[in-house]
Structures are given as structure tokens and as C-alpha cells.
Image (cartoon, rainbow, N blue to C red):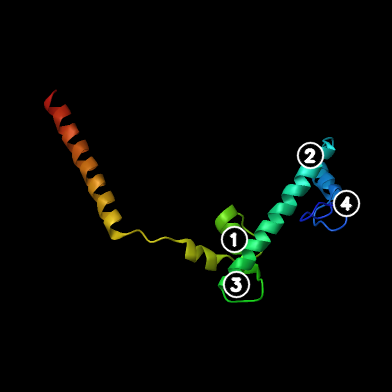
Amino acid sequence: MASPGRLDTDSNSLLTKRKIQEMVAQIDPSERLEPEVEDILLELADEFIESVTQFACKLAQHRKSNTLEVKDVQLHLERNWNIRIPGFASEEIRSVRKSTVPSSHTQKVTAVNNAKAVQMTMGGVKKEEGR
């Protein structure tokens, strides 16, 4: 019997021990996982799925929607886990991620680069004078 808040590993879970064994066999047919490792992987997968779903639902609510959409899950996975979902365009999300650099920062970086260039020029002149 599954503990409260935890999906049963064989019937209700999206991931089963059999599926984990199949995935491991695809990587290395001679490799076997201990039952405790399989249990931990199942628990982590269930917690991950629950966490992503809850956060994506919050994003849908933030959009003032009662419907969970792919873009909600996609945004959470890309922003918080750096996971890209193959087959779904993410241009909309990427365009939001681009940050604008304040002009004050750009000016400071330019000033530092100019100072470095002057130092390199002055250093080259001093070396030539010493010859």
C-alpha cells in the first residue's frame, strides 16, 4: 500500500519498476538496480511530476486560466530546470528570458575596457622605451 501523498509504484504511478528496468537495460543490458534504488527513483519521479504539475498550475492561475496548458509546464521546466521539451516551440519563452542590460552597466563595462586598452598601450610604450 502506498503512503499518503505517494502514488502506488505498480498501478497508479506514471513510472513503474518495470519501466525503470527497461530504461536501464537500454543503457546497459548487463546492469541491474537494487530494489531500494528502484524505490528511490520512483519516489523522486513522483515528487518531480507532482512539483512540476503544481507549479505549472500556479502559472495557469497567474494567467487567470482554469486550464493547464503545455506552455505552463514548458515555462516552468525551461526556467527552473533548464529542460527543453522536444517538439514544442519555445520562442515565446526564450524572448521573455532575454534580459535588458541597463545603460549604466554598459557604460561601466565600456569604461573598464577603455582603461584596459590604455594600460596595454602604455605598457607597450614603456617596454619599447626600455630597449
Left or right of 32 on screen, residue 74: left
Q: Is residue 33 above or below residue 88?
A: above
Element on which disc 1 rests:
helix
Q: Earlier in the sequence, mark 1 or mark 2?
A: 2
Query: How many angstroms separate mark 2 from mark 3 (CA)?
Result: 36 Å
Q: Which residue is mark 1?
A: 76
Q: Which residue is mark 4?
A: 1
Q: Earlier in the sequence, mark 2 or mark 3?
A: 2
Q: Which residue is mark 2?
A: 37
Q: Nearer the viewer, mark 2 or mark 3?
A: 3
Kind of residue at disc 2: Val
- Contact? badges 4 and 1 (CB < 8 Å): no
Query: How many angstroms separate mark 4 from mark 3 (CA)?
Result: 33 Å
Circle 3: is it few (<14), some (14-19), or many (20+) Cα within 10 Å? some
Circle 1: is it few (<14), some (14-19), or many (20+) Cα within 10 Å? some
Q: Which residue is mark 3?
A: 61
Residue situated in front as seen by the camera: 35 or 29: 35
